[in-house]
Amino acid sequence: MDQTSLTIQPNSILCGDARHVLASLPPDSVQSIVTSPPYFGQRDYQHDGQIGREKDSTEYVRNLVAVFAAARRVLRPDGTFWLNLGDKYQGSRLLGLPWKVALALAEDGWLLRADIVWHKPNAMPSAVKNRPTTDHEYLFLFSREPDYYYDADAIREPHTTFSENSKMKGGRGHFGKRGGTPEQGKNGGQANLHDGRWDQAFHPLGRNKRTVWSVPLGKFRDAHFAVFPPDLIRPCILAGAPTGSLVLDPFFGAGTVGVVARELQRHYLGIELNPDYVAMAQRRLDELASR
Ligand SMILES: C[S@@+](CC[C@H](N)C(=O)[O-])C[C@H]1O[C@@H](n2cnc3c(N)ncnc32)[C@H](O)[C@@H]1O
C-alpha cells in the first residue's frame, strides 16, 4: 500500500501508534493539533509502543519530537499546534520537561509562539513542606510558519481596566458612557492611545487573551487517566480552527478534543494506541451525537 494513500475520514478515530498512523495520512490536511501526550513516568497506558515509559527523559523527549515531526507534515502550513504538558519530579529534582520538550520542538523546526500557564485552581493538595505546591501545567502554542490562522477575536477576555468596575473609572470616565468612546468623547481623536492601549481599553469584544488560564480540572469518570477539561481546549479550537475545519489529537485518550470540536462545529481526527480507549472515546462521541 502506498504509504500516504489514506484519505482522512472526518470525525473518526484511528487506532495505532501515532508515529505510524501519522506517516500514513495525507500532507497539509489538518488545521490545528490539540493534544496532551502521556507525561513522563506517570501512568501505564497498558500497551506496547506507549510513550511516557522510556528509561530516561532524553528518550522521552526524542520520542515526542518524532511524533510531532510526523504531525507537522500533516498540518496545513497555516496551522497551529497546541501542546499541553506537565512536569515531573525525579527524587528531589524537577526535570523541567515541558520546556525541554518545547525547546527540542523549536530546534526541530516548530515556531514556538506562546507559553501558556494552565493554572489549576482545584489542584490536589500535597504534603510538601520545602517548596510550593504545584498547581500549574503548560500549554505551548506552535506554528509551522510565521503567518497562521489565529482568530484572536473568538477568545477575547473581559476588560479589567477601564471597565465599569475599574479603579481607573473615575479618572477616565469615558469607557462605556454614551458619547464617551474615543471617537466621540472627551478623548476623541487622542493620538497617544497607541494600538495596544486602544485594544486593551476599548475593543468591544474584550482584551486580547492572556497567557495565564485558570481552568479547574474536570472529571470524566470512565477514564483512568487525566482528561482535558473542555474549558482548557475550547479557546485553542476557537482560535486555531475556523468552523468546519479539522482538528487532530494524536493522543486521543477519552476523546475530549472530539467532544469539544463537535460542540464547536469543527471536525476531529483522533489517533489512539490502546483499542480499549478507542472504544471508550467512540462511545462517548456516539452518545453525544445521539443527543
Ligand atoms: C493523557 S492521555 C490523553 C487524554 C486526552 N487528552 C483526553 O482528554 O481524553 C494520553 C493518551 O495517549 C495514548 N498513547 C500513548 N502512547 C501512544 C502512542 N505511541 N500513539 C498513540 N497514542 C498513545 C495513551 O493510551 C493515552 O490514552
Image: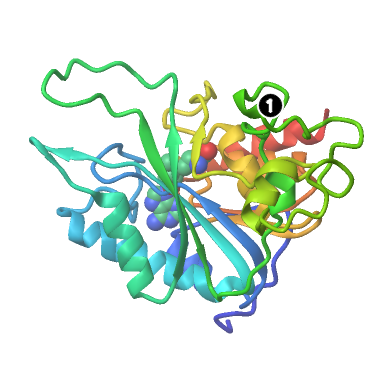
Q: Give me the residue at 35% from left, 47% from top.
A: 47
Closer-to-camera residue (6/118): 118
Residue at image coords 43%, 19%:
122
Residue at left offset 33%, top offset 74%: 107
Residue 149, placed above or below residue 41: below
Q: Amino acid at mark 1?
A: Lys
Colour setting = rainbow
Look at 76% across and 43% down and name the residue there. Answer: 264
Q: Which quadrant of the figure contains the C terminus?
A: top right
Image coords of residue 63 (percent x, y): 31, 63
Please say whether residue 190 is visible from this viewpoint: yes
Left/right placement of residue 199 relative to residue 54 reads right
The 10 Å Cα crowd at callout 1, few under 14, some 14 to 19, many 20 or more, is some
In the rendered image, residue 254, in percent from the top left (x then y), is placed at 54, 37
For the question of whether residue 25 can be seen, the reply is: no
Quadrant of the frame with the N terminus: bottom right
Residue 38, percent across and down? 37, 45
Q: Looking at the image, is 21 positioned above or below residue 199?
A: below
Nearer to us in this view, 45 or 116: 116
Residue annotated with mark 1: 169
Q: Nearer the viewer, residue 54 or 214?
A: 214
Q: Position of residue 54 (x, y in %)?
A: 21, 53
Q: Quadrant of residue 262?
A: top right
Q: Secondary structure at mark 1?
A: helix
Q: Is residue 257 above or below residue 124?
A: below
Residue 117 left/right relative to 41:
right
Single out the residue that lies furthest toward the bottom: 2
Q: Nearer the viewer, residue 254 or 28?
A: 28
